Amino acid sequence: MTKTIPGYVIALTTFRRTDRYLPLIECTLDRCWPAHAPTYCLTDGEAKLGRGDTLAYPGASWTQILFNGLCEVKKRNPGLTHMLHVLDDHCPLRPCDETALEGYFELARRNDFATVAFPTYRWPWHETEDKDYPDGLVRTWRKIETIIANGQKLAVVPRDFFRYFQVQPAFWRIEYLIAVCRHALDEGKHDAWGFEAMRWDGAARHYIADYNWPTVHHGFIASGKVNPEAIGFIDERVAPELRNQLLRDSIGVASPTLHRVLWASERFGARVLGRLRNTFAHAER
């Protein structure tokens, strides 16, 4: 059983349809982050962590799983203030910078920050956009507001960002995240996408860390399929089992060479098709 500890725990959310990856995710996490905090798996399935606690809620939605799991984690760890939430397919695929992560946790704890998220994509620190969208929300931010706290750089998420509650890997103040989940359930937001886009007057200030979580955008599963970028990004020295399983699920065999050839062909074909479409569209005008 996970013991009460000072600091934080990791909450990993998964679903029955992807919990076959759970043993591989746990092994990969151990290798990419040897000194990681105790881990809880929050799920609706039957797969269990080998070295952490699994909290299962059969038939529950994603938001219900997260909410129920957080309440149980808090009950078991009364002194817990923060936790790191990670979606199953956002597990690290390369070694983590343990010093950076511990530094951001200490920053969040000392300042009682509601959340500090780690992007899984190239974050636009110097890119802004003035485009107006029909919903009145921003995609690329209109301005970049940053702070430096204890030597760590953070960006302040604007309140009109269209994914204010984005579920990138993030340190959360656990009481705050429980309140966010409660509001999401009241609003009928039962999946991660609805959760991310939720609007709430009671929202606290959110921050983005100047540290990219070591995975790819959308994680290793995108739109219900293996994300080919993840296969190329994986450090095979620390995650060979996960890489091989993703290869088999993607192309039927654990051959990185064949995958590179097929993916290159697919991207080339997509570029050619895109150019043809643009050519015909221009000709018709």
Image (cartoon, rainbow, N blue to C red):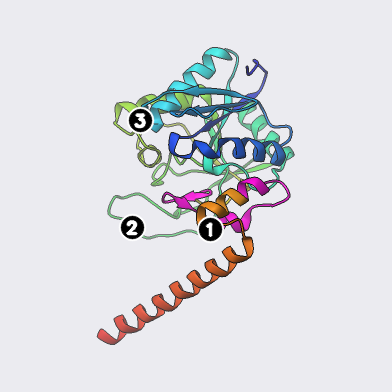
| Quarter of the C terminus within the rendering | bottom left
> Tag 1: residue type?
Pro
- Is the residue 50 above or below the residue 127 in the image? above
> Which residue is under mark 3?
184
Stretch in magenta: 219-243
| Quarter of the N terminus within the rendering | top right
**Judging from the image, what secondary structure is the residue with disc 2 in?**
loop
The reply to whether residue 255 is visible in this rendering is: yes
Q: Nearer the viewer, mark 2 or mark 1?
A: 1
**Judging from the image, what secondary structure is the residue with disc 3 in?**
helix
210 with respect to 187 (left or right):
right
- N-terminal of the two: label 3 or label 2? 2
> Tag 2: residue type?
Asp
- N-terminal of the two: label 2 or label 1? 2
* Residue 75 forms part of the magenta stretch: no
For the residues labelled 1 and 3, the Cα–Cα distance comes to 32 Å
Mark 2 closeness class: few <14, some 14–19, many ≥20 residues within 10 Å: few
> Which residue is under mark 1?
228
